[in-house]
Amino acid sequence: MVKIIDATDLVLGRLAARVAKMALMGEEIVILNCENAIISGKKHIVLLKFQVREKRVQPFKGPFKKRMPDRIVRSVIKGMLPHAKWTEDSRGRQAFGRVKCFLGVPDEYKTQKIETFAEITADKLKSHFYVTVGEISQLLKQHGSY
């Protein structure tokens, strides 16, 4: 059974923790609208954290950091999985293979039932500062140094 989740207005860290746990339990997970997931904090501070993370690497040797919104969400989920031994048969790697992230809604998932998590929405953040993953992705592409 494939569980389809809409990431619109969901807090990214809480979404990633929940998806990682479900993937470890053996469920196939598809995340749609990754560009609409939310990171709490002021825009310039969140962008600065991503830029610092990008500049810690060798520009031509890597490791290369993700800039597309779906890949940013997928890498956050990867960070929530166990990674002590990242071999072919490890639990974390198998769980990571069960997670798929998409920008928007692909045609094959338009007719299927799409779920969301009401308890991790950003309703509490509406009066505070937040930025979407899509905005961070665009800013990283504009201000990218490599």
Image (cartoon, rainbow, N blue to C red):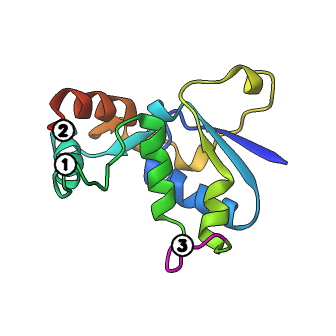
To which residue does mark 1 refer?
A: 59
User: What residue is rendered at 80% in x and 28% in y?
Assistant: 112
Residues under numbered marks 3 and 1 in contact, where contact means CB atoms less than 8 Å apart: no
Is residue 84 rendered magenta in the image?
yes
User: What residue is rendered at 61% in x and 55% in y?
Assistant: 19
Q: Is residue 81 above or below residue 139?
A: below
Disc sitting over residue 146 in the figure: 2
In this rendering, position of residue 137 left or right of residue 18: left
Mark 2 or mark 1, earlier in chain: 1
Q: Nearer the viewer, residue 26 or 57?
A: 57
Q: Is residue 17 above or below residue 33?
A: below
Q: Quarter of the image for the C terminus: give it.
A: top left
Q: Helix, strand or loop at disc 3?
A: loop
Q: Label 3 vs label 1: CA separation?
A: 24 Å
To which residue does mark 3 refer?
A: 86
In this rendering, position of residue 102 left or right of residue 53: right
* Image spot of residue 32 (x, y percent): 60, 33
Please, what is the three-letter code of the amino acid marked with disc 2?
Tyr
* Image spot of residue 43 (x, y percent): 21, 37
Mark 3 or mark 1, earlier in chain: 1
Please, what is the three-letter code of the amino acid marked with disc 3?
Trp
Q: Label 2 vs label 3: CA separation?
A: 28 Å
Residues under numbered marks 2 and 1 in contact, where contact means CB atoms less than 8 Å apart: yes
Part of the protein shown in magenta: 83-88
Q: Nearer the viewer, residue 36 or 144?
A: 144
Determine the image quadrant of residue 3.
top right
Q: Main secondary structure of the magenta part?
A: loop
Mark 2 or mark 3, earlier in chain: 3
Disc sitting over residue 143 in the figure: none
Q: Is residue 11 visible?
A: no
Q: Nearer the viewer, mark 3 or mark 1?
A: 1
